[in-house]
Image: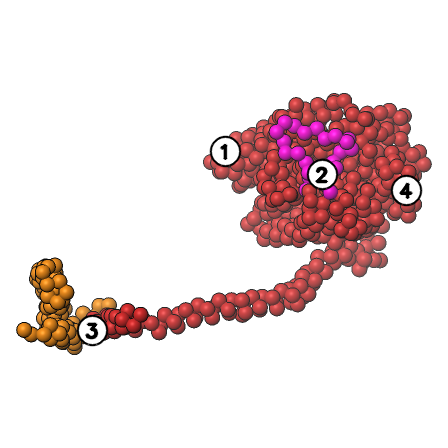
Chain colours: A red, B orange
Amino acid sequence: MFSYTIFIMLLPLLSFIVLGLAGMKMKHKVAGLIGTCSLALVTILSYLTAFQYFGMDRVDGVYQTVVPYNFTWLPLGKLHFDLGILLDPISVVMLIVISTVSLMVHIYSFGYMHGEKGFQRYYAFLSLFTMSMLGLVLATNIFQMYMFWELVGVSSYLLIGFYYPLKPAIAASKKAFIVTRFADMFFLIGILMFGYFTESFSFSFAGHGANVVMGEGTTPFIPVDIVRALSAGAFILPTALTLMFIGGAGKSAMFPLHIWLPDAMEGPTPVSALIHAATMVVAGVFQIARMFPLWITFAPQALSIVVWVGVFTAFYAAAVACAQSDIKRVLAFSTISQIAFMMVALGVSLPGHGTIFDDHAQLGYMAGMFHLFTHAMFKACLFLGAGCIIHAVHSNEMALMGGLRKYMPITHVTFLISCLAIAGIPFFSGFCSKDEIITACFSYSPVVGWIMTGIAAMTAFYMFRLYYGIFWGTENKEAHAHHTPHEAPSCMTIPLIVLSVITVGVGIYSTLAGFLGWGGSFGSFVSSTGKDYTIHFDTQIAVTSTVIAILSICLATYIYKGESQPIADRLYKQFPRLHRAAYKRFYQDEIWQFVTHRIIFALVSTPIAWFDRYIVDGTFNFLAWGANEAGESIRPWQSGDVRQYAVWFLTGTVALSLILLCI
Amino acid sequence: MVPVQYYFILSALLFFIGVYGFISRRNLIAMLISVELILNAVEINFAAFNRLLFPGQLEGFFMSLFGIGVAAAETAVAIAIIINVYRNFNSDNVDSIQNMKR
């Protein structure tokens, strides 16, 4: 029934191959059209899949997991690496998110990347990325997920390094790839541990229904042998899952592996919107969501690691974002902070008292996925809006902006809508998801709840600092003298409008549904038990968080709205070191540089390199020297002297005949 | 009659004189003459053994005749080679062929 889903994977792959091989021979427009049309088809198929999947009847109140394709790629005795497609509520939701944002980015890039050299290459890499991300979420087993995980990393590397003639871009792309690859080492160890002890890579525990509907001709899932894993030791599964989480933490930019994300802003802004805001960076969150049944049942204590890493990262990123002057860096740190929110949401989602899958206690799972959905939409809108601003002002720095609301009305309104969403104002989508996360945090521990509320307040503050810094305040007349900023062309503003409409639409419906108790909101599609969950807002928490958000916005307005910012300047003078530390991201990059250069390179790598050069290479050089010397010693035999040859011939004959006589 | 061992001794003597001559002479024609000596010694050997072991049969003599024929052909080839060597290296010494020397 879902046999068309294979095209969701094949179309972007085909478009990558065509654009990659023949792109340079095509005109820009043709390449862009091929990429965009293939993606439009993918989007249509994704929506069709979602419509059909969520339209299916539930079995025992739960959407069944459907596996239309699963074939064995590499059989290895009992384990085998499969490639396939798995449809389950979270993967279908991710399909919608990825395809929508990717389509918006494709359309937007027509305008943003207009005239760039390498336009076709850009669209080829966008297709590669989309295919990889889709493969990641549709994976039927952890190894397929890992394979596409690495492919996503490669696409990110290629796209960040798009402006490769520039040194910062190359450095940033290398940094991104190396940091995520380092984290993926732990992921791989986790996978191997998991596969060894449970003798399966398959997501046979995926979904919540007892039956997984396999398509015809698919390789069946090997059930995950939990008994065997547990008998090897109770720490095995938590360790494997935590190692996998470390891999996810690298990809999702959790502290301290977040260092690559701000630098990744060197790539083109639509790339930042697609990869580093909406899709790739949520891969870590998706991984935990996918493995969630195992986390809940066998490693609930390990979830506390997830929570505290998330809380610290959220706070750290929010603190740094308050002091950044480059608009893309503010958005990057904001992304890190919001993904930390999603991680915290998953982490606080613990079993309730009594049954394992208790409806209310596991709110965090639903909230985290809901936030993933809403965040993807409004963050992509923010980044694309930032792209319009950069396009108008030709710079990323806030100092050159200010007062842009007169010149760019559409960008202004959509940016404002997204800022209101991220700040958590009711009737915008961010409020619903963030409120659910905070509710879940409060039911886990009040400490975590209040910390996350505080961080939400900081979020509202720095986002509105950004908003006022760009659109209000004094205009930078000198910069505008050369080139008056103008609104972006319609192919760039239409995606902004679409994403804002989604944000507002989902927001209005979910807010009303949450307060009035309607069904049909996100919880009826994705929830920890799989059953239809009606979101009810806890009035106390909702009111508290809204009031705090409004207060933060007022504070930001008070400080940043005016023509000049005396309070901000006074604070800057009073706390110069704190400001500089925050501006320099609390020296995390310098710490990592120190650790890698002074400790790892000097103490570990240098001796190993010495060993390799002198001992390993030395052995082989010695063997070669020996062979050479042996050859040199035999060389005089080939003298070219016929008489010497005759002597040897005679000697040999005499010797041979003596031997034959004696035998 | 001459005892048959004397033929063997003669044949051996001629063979090793020929070998010595091949090794020690520098002139190519002299080396060729030595090779002829070796071949002739071998033919005497065949004839003598034939007379000793197979008195009524003639296979050994046929080998000798064959050997004489082969010696003649090989001499022709060898003279051709010697002439080419002389033309290229302008000398009739075996030491003059230096191309393959280190």
Question: Residue A525's image quarter?
Answer: top right
Report the residue at 51% width, 67% height from top: A617
Q: Measured from the top left, where is residue A219 in percent x and y?
A: 63, 34
Secondary structure at numbered mark 2: loop
Magenta range: A201-225
- Whether labels 1 and 2 belong to a single chain: the reply is yes
Marks 1 & 2, CB-CB < 8 Å contact: no
Q: Which chain letter matches label 4?
A: A
Type of amino acid at the residue the image marks with label 3: Arg
Residue to which mark 1 is pinned: A27
Seen from the viewer's position, the closer of residues A543 and A185 is A185
Tag on residue A643?
3
Q: Are marks 4 and 1 in contact (CB under 8 Å)?
A: no
State the predominant SS element of the stretch in magenta: loop
Q: Earlier in the sequence, mark 3 or mark 1?
A: 1
| Up/down of A472 relative to B95, above or below | above
Tell me which corner region of the image, top left, top right, bottom left or bottom right, holds residue A293.
top right
Marks 2 and 3 belong to one chain: yes
Label 1: chain? A
Spatial distance from mark 1 to mark 2, Cα to Cα? 50 Å
Q: Is residue A432 visible?
A: yes
Residue A15 in magenta stretch: no
Viewer-side residue, B39 vs A186 = B39
Please name the residue that numbered disc 2 is placed on: A223
Task: Name the quarter where the N terminus of chain B is drawn.
Answer: bottom left
Q: Does residue A224 belong to the magenta stretch?
A: yes
Q: Residues within 10 Å of mark 2 (few under 14, many from 20)?
A: some
Q: Is residue A47 left or right of residue A72?
A: right
Residue A438 seen anywhere in this rendered image of the structure: no
* Residue beneath the point at 65% across and 51% down: A181
Mark closest to the chain's N terminus, 3 or 4: 4
